[in-house]
Amino acid sequence: MAVKTIEFRDNAVYLLDQTRLPRDVVVLELRRAEEVVEAITSLRIRGAPAIGVAGAYALVLASLQADASDVARFMASLWEAARSIGQARPTAVNLQWALQRLLRVSEGASTPEEARRRLLEEARKIQREDEEADRLIGVHGAPLIPQGGVVLTHCNTGALATAGQGTAFGILRTAWQQGRLRHVYATETRPVMQGSRLTAWELVQEGIPASLIVDSAAGTLMAQGKVDCVIVGADRIAANGDVANKIGTYTLAVLAREHGIPFYVAAPISSVDLSVASGEAIPIEERPAWEVTYLGGQAIAPEGIGVYNPAFDVTPHRLVTAIVTERGVVLPPFEEGLR
Amino acid sequence: MAVKTIEFRDNAVYLLDQTRLPRDVVVLELRRAEEVVEAITSLRIRGAPAIGVAGAYALVLASLQADASDVARFMASLWEAARSIGQARPTAVNLQWALQRLLRVSEGASTPEEARRRLLEEARKIQREDEEADRLIGVHGAPLIPQGGVVLTHCNTGALATAGQGTAFGILRTAWQQGRLRHVYATETRPVMQGSRLTAWELVQEGIPASLIVDSAAGTLMAQGKVDCVIVGADRIAANGDVANKIGTYTLAVLAREHGIPFYVAAPISSVDLSVASGEAIPIEERPAWEVTYLGGQAIAPEGIGVYNPAFDVTPHRLVTAIVTERGVVLPPFEEGLR
């Protein structure tokens, strides 16, 4: 992968500022947990798996910042840091999941130094595991695409969204290498344009034939018979298979069902949250109004207009054809398969 | 109406440059038919009924430009001008319809001077008729909104899109004056942002409580039970009731059906084209790629990415609950009602 989304070395987090893509390739050097939290909140790094890795490294940085003269105080400040990092974004469960893993390994440490070492080891392990998960998602998912198939995808689920080759996009990459994939339609994904800015960038870099569409063109595209399947990622999957993902995913799922097109969700197991029974219990982040009313620093809507800007929506499991994880393809009923 | 979308006086067309809204209110003074054609092609004026009026006045300007020394040559240049004006945009039938009306009245004229007078009279008549059609569409359509109702609309169908108070938006205006309307959700309408720039502007001016959403949020909005009905306009309605309208309309119709929400289309009879049997025969304009890949003059997508940018889509009549025209509410089967 040419893209290095996030890296930890020399006690610093290096991350590609995705708000600057595709125009500028800027790598940020972050040495404080607060800076990583800001990067997550501002979408400099995004994508559920990548947020998990970034959150883990943020906690590593917090452990380096923390006063190590007293073990109890050190551990208390770790917990406090994890709480604060965990609030950066509410919908993707990977952030909480990664922080829990780190806190768990730190508990057995007898000294702050050992805790710091364990935290970094575990964070690196999460990153490596995610890379491997993506590879396997690609292996399991690619056969779902028919030979010469055309796929519609949404948002960005590529190398920029994960520690590896991507989830839904990883399947596209694997299928492309296998010669199965003919064309990709990528939605631009308003309001933050992860499709135009990030997915299109990865598609061009990979040399995959692809076309951008505005989000609302998905319906006519399907009606014209131009799409063989839809593959999207997930920010959180409930125990029953309901999927929280980027706003617009639900609309695509309804359209896919209307046109008899398979609708696949690709995500690592770290995105599955068995503690929530259904999608109704998943918190949906509302983002600021200016994401909708400003473009490139300029107002496009008049003063005084209201805005409703949910960043995610929930697709009920009945609209999902299959969920692809690193362990294989889960078919309905998802309740059993996911467990 | 505070908005003067288009006006003809002193041998010139005055039109509000809608590409500059909502930031700048700029009125263009156009004295040549070619300038009006450019304004239509560049979306300085848009909306099927407004395009019809603009096309009519463009032909009036062409008649003023034409050499009047020879009647035959004068009439030939009128036909040539009508052909060229008619190509400005292909989907809205109102443009062809208005030009045909003007050519027809000019045929009976014995002198170029009389033809010019008749053309201007007919163009003004088209504008007056459209204003009255909007008023009646509002009267017929408002009762479709339940008391305290919340309406989702798409693109701009207001005073900016017509010669009157608007089609779908005209219904909102009338329902608001009647105290029936509680809230409007307006889609931003990518790629040209007629929702954010124009509909939001008219909503704020009118004082109607309203929220902008990205186009892809319509699904979750309906799933949350926040919408009582959808009302949109039309660029062309086929004999069977199939509706060509702004890209994304079809997606909204599928979503409305999925959620059991009525889906209404509002348009003057001038948008009905009985010469096309079904939506398949309606030409769908594809607009330039830069509408999708550039924002405010800056590239948001990488070089080398393909773009598919249809400006309209077709909603099959089976998804349309009713069509509101100046003559009343047409219910299925539309084939008979429209005739």
Image (cartoon, coloured by chain):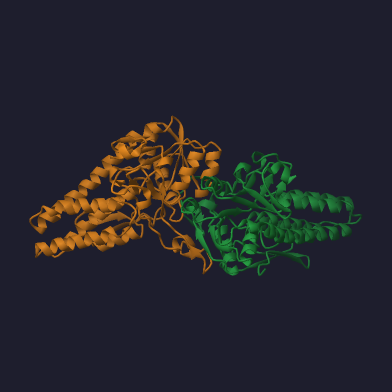
Chain colours: A orange, B green
Residue B163 placement (x, y as % from top left): 71, 61
Residue B336 placement (x, y as % from top left): 73, 42
Q: Give the left or right position of residue B69, taking residue A174 as reference.
A: right
Is B315 drawn above or below residue A327 in the view shown? below
- Residue at figure coordinates x 45%, y 63% from the top left: A289
> Which one is nearer the viewer's eye here, A94 or A161?
A94
The N terminus of chain B lies in quadrant: bottom right
> Which one is nearer the viewer's eye here, B208 or B47?
B208
Can I make out residue B35 in this image?
Answer: no
- Residue at figure coordinates x 59%, y 49% from the top left: B311
- Residue at figure coordinates x 24%, y 51% from the top left: A98
Looking at the rendered structure, the number of numbered marks drawn on it comes to 0
Can I make out residue A234 in this image?
Answer: yes
> Which one is nearer the viewer's eye here, B253 or B53?
B253
Q: Give the left or right position of residue B130, taking residue B253 as reference.
A: right
Residue A207 placement (x, y as % from top left): 42, 40
Residue B3 placement (x, y as % from top left): 66, 67
Q: Give the left or right position of residue A50, taking residue B113 as reference.
A: left
